[in-house]
Amino acid sequence: VCLLLAAAFLLALYGVKSLSVAFPLSALEAAGGMLFPFPAALAVNLCGVAVAQTVPYLLGRREQGGLTALVEGHPRLAVLERPGSARPGRTVFLLRLAGASPGDLVSMYLGAAGVSWRAYFTGGLLGSLPRVASATLLGAALWDVGGPSFWISTGVGAALTALSAALMVLLAARRKKA
């Protein structure tokens, strides 16, 4: 019963986090890794990420006509191209895999851009999976800072960051060619 209450509370925190761009999602993912065994932590964290991605997406869908105003209010969103209708799921997947930040604003933008729920949800969760798994592993490893699992999870996180940077550079170069 206590673990179910802890999971419900953590999911509620994910919902609150979805309304704030200032609080890092990885802190909640690490907390999940500390609280639960890895398979359960990963499941809770993926559900939490689904919540954290859904709320701003739905807010964006509600304001579909305000896409220009959203970009004007948050100039960092101007670098995003409006997802094409051919493969919006791939665009969402790559944005999440690359860790496009801030994620809440990206979710709002994609909702306002009219990306379908199915493409958004599937691409978003699949693209987020490596980062969620890495942060969950790091959280589990925090019980033994300096131990092998800590350094492995830190290395995986660093590799994901490097991969994300390379992916963003490649996508930017590809966009310039087009």
Image (spheres, rainbow, N blue to C red):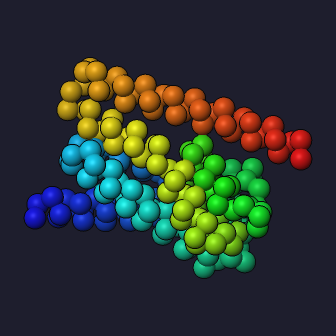
- The residue located at (29%, 27%) in the rendering is 149
**Residue 58, placed above or below residue 101:** below
Q: Is residue 161 left or right of residue 63?
A: left
State the image coordinates of residue 82 (x, y, percent, origin top left): 76, 61
State the image coordinates of residue 76 (x, y, percent, origin top left): 68, 50
Q: Observer-nearest residue: 43 or 147?
A: 43
**Residue 73, placed above or below residue 132:** below
The answer to whether one can see residue 157 in this image is yes
Quadrant of the drawing holding the N terminus: bottom left
| Residue, far left | 1
State the image coordinates of residue 31 (x, y, percent, origin top left): 28, 46
Q: Observer-nearest residue: 169 or 18?
A: 169
State the image coordinates of residue 32 (x, y, percent, origin top left): 28, 49
**Residue 98, placed above or below residue 3:** above
Figure quadrant of residue 9: bottom left
Q: Is residue 78 left or right of residue 100?
A: right
| Residue, far right | 178
Number of labelled discs?
0
Q: Is residue 21 left or right of residue 1?
A: right
- The residue located at (25%, 25%) in the rendering is 145
- The residue located at (70%, 69%) in the rendering is 113
- The residue located at (28%, 59%) in the rendering is 10
